[in-house]
Amino acid sequence: MNDTRRASEPGTDEARVMTLRIVQWTTGNVGKESVKAIVANPRLALVGCYAWSPAKVGIDVGELVGIGPVGIAATDDVAALLALRPDCVVYNPMFPSVDELVRILEAGINVVATAAFITGTNLGTQRDRLVEACERGGSSLFGTGVSPGFAELVAVTIAGICSRVDKVIVTETADTTFYDSPDTERPAGFGQPIDNPDLANMARAGTAVFGEAVAMVADVLGVELDEIVCESEFAQTTEDLVMASWTIPAGHVAGVAASWQGRVGGRTIIDLNVRWKKGTTLDPAWVIEKDGWVITVEGLPTVTASLDFLPPPDFQAETIEEFMAIGHIITAVPALNAIAAVVAAAPGIITYADFNLPHPRGWTRR
């Protein structure tokens, strides 16, 4: 870990709080909301920004995200960003690049990521490179998001009032018709012919990060799983589904459901599942009443919580794209809120199981 933190200006309410120096990595949909939140937070200081697109290089980061100049130009000069010696990089690409992360971590810079990363086990042997980079640099790597990530944190938190835990269930439902990101949805099976024999494998690969989250929840519960499996189902559109940047033809997948289950002795202890649909012409006709999460801990007592998200009264959203920013905010902010804990953590890949939370260990009925 580096030691470049500096105190806030004397005479302010934040004078006794250390300000953490941050480099933002990319300014895509999630990265834009990350920048806005960093700039608004007196405990975080934006000192640099990586631009993946050459068109963004040299442009003020504030202008890139629509908040006006902040005095920092986006750059693709990685060496220059690492030379800033920030406390943390906020890493918001769509998917992780092991090469990028190794370079950052071995330079002694901590990373919080929303790039489909919880434990890194899906990376196979590439995960070892990340662990070794953390050891060389004395840095830490943490992955989260809203789901998987924060939703599972809520689940293990409400389990803290149970004297017996039988099963933890997190169910995410969403109508993604207006979520214009085919690059993230095609890998899970969207747009494929409904009779494609490889659909189950595609759903497993495209949602594999939920398997990492199952392992994280088991770690918090203090449970050793026998296996983690994925079960899936699909729905087709009966008419051509035309969206902003792509079209799903009739007879192709416009609904994907995946259930990632952690089992002990053949019994499911943890079930993290998603059900995503597009349009109103599905067969079978999946009904999604609202976007959000239902979190249930079965046990003594059984506890159920609903995690919804709505804009505040002063939030101006004139287009569907502006309203979709809410989803990007709730993806970005869990990572930002973890920065202080990650900076203080021992080197290595860490999860919510490593944070100083009241974990409900020992209550799970085997």
Image (tube, grey):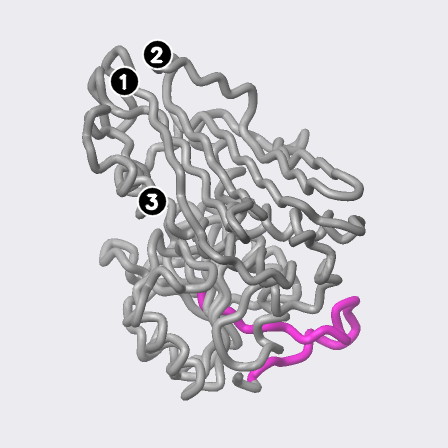
Look at mark 2 in the image and give the residue it sits on.
281
Marks 2/3: CA–CA distance: 24 Å
Q: Earlier in the sequence, mark 1 or mark 2?
A: 1
Mark 1 → mark 3, Cα distance in angstroms: 24 Å
Q: Residue at x 40, y 56 (%)?
A: 115
Instruction: Indicate the amino acid at tag 1.
Output: Leu
Q: Which mark is residue 241?
A: 1
In this view, the mark in front (1 or 2): 2
Task: Tell me if 137 is positioned left or right of 171 in this view.
Answer: left
Helix or strand or loop: what does disc 2 sit on? loop
In the displayed structure image, the side of residue 228 where residue 200 appears, left or right: left
Between label 1 and label 3, give the one nearer the viewer. 3
Numbered disc 1: secondary structure: strand
Task: Please say whether residue 112 is one of the residues in the magenta stretch.
Answer: no
Give the class, few, some or many, for how many residues have Cα within 10 Å of label 3's Cα (few <14, many ≥20): many
Question: Are discs 1 and 2 less than 8 Å apart at CB?
Answer: yes
The answer to whether residue 38 is seen in the rendering is no
Q: Are marks 2 and 3 in contact (CB under 8 Å)?
A: no
Segment colored magenta? 4-24
Q: Does 23 lie within the magenta span?
A: yes
* Residue 16 position in % (x across, y down): 77, 76
Q: Quadrant of the C terminus?
A: bottom right
The residue indicated by pointer 3 is 204
Is 13 or 102 nearer to us in this picture? 102
- When the figure is inspected, residue 147 is found, relative to residue 84, above or below; the finding is above
* Disc 3 residue type (three-letter): Arg
Crowding near the residue tagged with mark 1, few <14, some 14–19, many ≥20 C-alpha atoms within 10 Å = some
